[in-house]
Image (cartoon, rainbow, N blue to C red):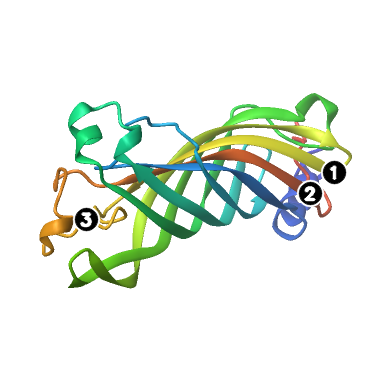
Amino acid sequence: MKKLVLLITFICVTNTSNAQINEVGLFIGGSNYIGDIGPEYYINPTNIMGGVIYKWNMNPRISFRGTFTYAAIKSDDKNATNRERYFRGIGFKNSIKELAVGIEFNYFNYNLDDYRNTYTPYLLLEFAAFNYNIVVAETAPLQYQYASKTAFAIPFGIGYKTKLFQDFAIAFELRARYTFVDDIDYNNNNIKSLTFGNPNSNDWYILSGISLVYTFGRPACYSSPF
């Protein structure tokens, strides 16, 4: 009996390392910025975002994932609830191209091949690098020279995923990005016309939307031999 248990365990480990379930898909939704311009709502998906996603399911509770996201980012003081911002009247537009890697922690076991485990809420922890535009010089009054910049963010989020049909699943997800920069809105302390807000408060951006993924690959040996 002991030898049988060891054999089954070995087969499970072998399958886990060589035949995991993979997921690829697309996601679309909205984005918003939180910073020194415009409204201060944390979830306000007024701009479009979209991208691609890949997941590698290590087991029914943990998935490793990578995403590439494009998000339009803009905000305007005319939409601010803060009166001081409203009468200041500043606005901006930018775009973010983000590459993120991270881990999903499923609250329940998740396996599309088992009808009892085809849905779960989950937590998301990631590390992200993103590219966007900044202002580097004022060439004339209110005329600026732009450049590209890459920075980093600590993203975290929550979601809920469920089987749609056959090997397809759908997920609803909210991802928050805390950045280490304060210039997504073109804030620049070296340019008087672009010096505003709180220099000690970094920018955030929020991504919220829906993803559709296709699952492929032979399922791993998840069941316990005991």
According to the picture, the residue beneath numbered tag 3 turns out to be: 187
Pointer 1 or 2: first along the chain: 1
Whole-number angstrom distance, CA of label 3 to CA of label 1: 46 Å
**One can see residue 177 in this view:** no
- Image location of residue 33, percent across then percent down: 38, 43
According to the picture, the residue beneath numbered tag 2 turns out to be: 214
Q: Which one is nearer the viewer's eye here, 23 or 41? A: 41
Image point (15%, 48%), residue name: 196
In the image, residue 119 above or below residue 112: above
Pointer 3 or 2: first along the chain: 3
Mark number, residue 122? none
Foreground disc of the pair 3, 1: 3
Image point (33%, 62%), residue name: 151
Image point (65%, 52%), residue name: 55
Mark number, residue 167? 1
CB under 8 Å between callouts 1 and 2? yes
Three-letter code, disc 2: Tyr
Q: Which residue is the extreme one toward the front?
A: 141
- Secondary structure of the residue carrying tag 3 is loop
- Secondary structure of the residue carrying tag 1 is loop
